[in-house]
Amino acid sequence: MTSRRKLVLGVPALSIIGALALPRAAQASPDGIIRSGNYYLGVTPDDGVPDRDGGLIPIAQGALGDGDPARFVGWRGASNAPRTISLVFDLLNDLPLDRIRIVSNAPAPGWGFTEISVTYRAEADTAYHLAGKATRAGEAAYELSVPMADRQARFVRIEIVRSGALLHVPLSEVEIHRGHGDAGTNPGPALTAAELQAELSKYTRLADRYGQYLYQDWPGKVTSDEQLQHEYAQEAAALAGVVRNPERYDRYGGIKSLGRHGATGYFRLQKVDGRWWFVTPEGHLFFLKAVDAFSEEEWGYGTVYENPDGSPRDVFDELPDPDRFAKAYAVVENGLITVNFVKANLMRKYGDDYKAKWRGITHRRMIDWGFNAQGKWQRDPAVPFPYIERAPTPLDVIKVSWAIDPFDPDFSTKLDRAFNLRQYRDDPWLIGYFFENERGWSRDIVAEVVRRDGDLPAKVAFVHYLSDAYDDDLARVNEILGTNAGSFRALTDEPININRVPDADVRAFITLAAKRYFQTVRNAIQRQDPHHLFLGSCLVPTWRTSPEWNSGGAQYVDALSFDWYSSDIKELTRYAVLDKPILNLEFCFMQPDRGMTSHNPGIAATSQADRGVRYTSFIEALAATPTFVGSAWFAHYDQAVTNKPGSTESFNIGLVNQQDQPYHDMTSIMRETNRRLEEIHLQAPPA
């Protein structure tokens, strides 16, 4: 007998045009279930009568409201199927609601969904409010009960998210139970299908005046400016004596007790007793423990508040006053109009001219927590830490999908024009540069290259590679590729099917491209700045790249840099055979809580303390390898619960939340871990 998982939530918190003539007042049946009104499905289902015909569906007649659990509405999976399915109910009047019960019986394996959320609004409201949300663990029989506590609503929306496009989604029943209290007066007419379709695009309120999640309370949630100011006074007193110990560390954070290893005035890398280390400008060993996006000015900490057409993005209970908090408003990448709650809250906490106080306490926090550098992205040059800088990408490079064509004969000249590195060449605090970010070459890039004609430099280079690899044997190359080119020159203009290209040649050509790319970039950096390190391209080892690209240019970089969000270190340590220093310049662990989410299940934590525990396990395992020389935690602050600009990301990535409150349960664990990383690295087996 199939068991049913029943969830009860306590969170205070659908393309065919036409309308049906329906009663003006929604009535509840004797069992309290509202059966008058109608609903609309934003994605027309494949199963369910009359639901699969689309349009407006009377609640009492549709498969979701007829009281028969054997009938269901189903959305079949397909490669192009939408991940999100939405539907909306029009109850025809504002009514007090007791609860909303949702039943999803999977008729067979392969049916289910991942997440479900319920929102509602009264007729006069401009935005929806969250009633509840939940995840589904894969049960065949699933039931969700969302208490409404007599809240008034005319419209109820349900949004279902499936983890993959091939998953079939079943929905058996939606019961909306009437609560106690009076119905609204003078309701508007029943909405048409087009009007209900528009309801699916209306916003849901998410954030309060401090940028905090509306639908959850927690210890320390900010309720006043005075609270923020009191927290500053307490923390400033607690950190008043925090300074870097000059007996233990040099001015750049190098460990004095590990001896002098040659002072050059700049950061460099050296293998000492079989283990790789950074060496500071003063000659002391240094293990990188950086924080990315250090500055509160980082554009990714903001959130869009106004649409390009000037209409408001109605997800906020209250926005910061645009006069007092003018510094918190900005137009950022791609012309997005944003507000930065971090900056507004810093002004509330430290005063309108907040920078000096913020820098002071932030510097002491980082020393206290054991971090020693500013990593990638927006930094604050007034906070005295070593740092990493980005060498900018020329706007006029030739692109193949996401990747650069390094065979462009003008690539080097374009780099010279775009780079402005002479301003950094004499700065001893600069560790080095990275170029591009998370963009390498994979088989997909080669597939695009070989489809193109001879106007693409990479296609010409590929044909040259084939000519060399096959000793100018055109007949053999034609046979392998299924082409009929009269010359190698003619072959550059012929589209080639990647499936005809031997895998060994794909991999060899990626390696050739990597060598060309990294050598060209390194030479361009050294022409402007011969003093600092080239730290590679911050590649995600398994995405938009390949092992051949990751290692192919190793001889031209000072360190291999990766961005690896995982609990498993194997994708980083596999490159230890190159005996090259390895960096992980983006990683973190996230707790899906307080309206924020996690990037992937592998880095999802169960609490803030668990984030710290996972940090310890991951970073200590890496420190115990001889080639690993450090990392950068992404990032200083959380993303907004109302999403990063231009994205659906609202990740709990910060050491500190957007209200400038540190996650002490996590940072206290990080502090102890960071203090012993050098000792762990000293014990790594020599390479």
Image (tube, rainbow, N blue to C red):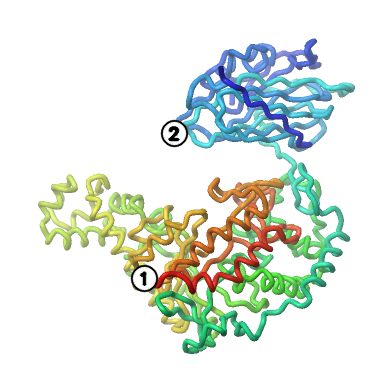
| Dot 2 amino acid type | Ser
Residue plotted at (75% across, 15% down): 36
| Residue identifier under label 2 | 79
Where disc 2 sits, the SS reads loop
Q: Position of residue 52 (x, y in %)?
A: 55, 18
Q: Is residue 38 above or below residue 294?
A: above
Quadrant of the rendered structure where residue 79 is? top left
- Numbered mark located on residue 579 in the image: 1
Q: Position of residue 84 (x, y in %)?
A: 57, 34
Q: Is residue 331 above or below residue 240?
A: above
- Towards the viewer: 245 or 294: 245
- Towards the viewer: 171 or 51: 171
| Dot 1 amino acid type | Asp
- Left or right of 523 in this view: 568: right
Q: Say few, some or many: other residues with alpha carbon within 10 Å of mark 1 (under 14 / 14 to 19 / 20 or more).
A: some
Q: Which numbered mark, 2 or 1, is in the foreground of this view? A: 1
